[in-house]
Image: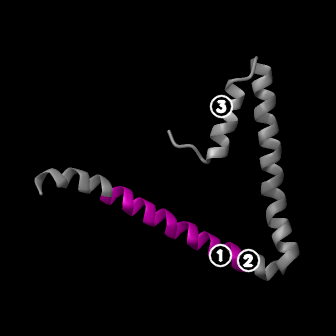
Amino acid sequence: MAWPCGLLHSALLVAAMASSAAAGAIVMGGFAAVTAAGLALGPALWTWIGGRAAAARATNWGVRLAGLALAGASGFALGHGLWMRIAPYC
């Protein structure tokens, strides 16, 4: 199973260690509220600082950079798995 981020993993761990299910739900609710606020206010702050055009350019380049990182990591993972199968024959 893939985790979206390490911060979510740590929040799940803290919620699991809570004394009751209700306390765990409160922990996860707090995490959701803070995360939602950051996701909503981050782009608004970026637009306010640099203007709408700067935010659009940053978003475009951010998406391209994320795609490049995903393609590179996928290529590395595929190549590493392939190399581990071929290495015994070399």
* Residue positioned most to the bottom: 53
The residue lying at 50 percent from left, 38 percent from top is 1
Q: Secondary structure at mark 2?
A: helix
Q: Which residue is mark 1?
A: 60
- Badge 3 density bin: few <14, some 14–19, many ≥20, Cα 10 Å: few
* Quarter-of-image position of residue 43: bottom right
Q: Tell me, yes or no, whether the two marked residues, 1 and 2, touch with CB atoms within 8 Å.
A: yes
The kind of residue tagged 3 is Leu
For label 2, count other residues whose C-alpha is less than 10 Å away and answer few (under 14), some (14-19) or many (20+). Answer: some
Query: Which badge, 3 or 2, is on the more N-terminal residue?
Result: 3
Point 85% across, 67% down: residue: 45
Amino acid type of the residue tagged 2 in the rendering: Ala
Residue 13: image tag: 3
Image quadrant where residue 75 sits: bottom left
Q: Which residue is mark 2?
A: 56
Circle nearer the N terminus (3, 1): 3
Identify the amino acid type marked 1: Asn
**Image: 53 above or below 46:** below
Query: What is the x, y in percent for residue 17?
Result: 69, 23
Q: CA distance from mark 3 to mark 1?
A: 34 Å
Q: Label 1's element?
A: helix
Residue 86 falls in which quadrant of the image? bottom left
Residue 60 within the segment the image draws in magenta: yes
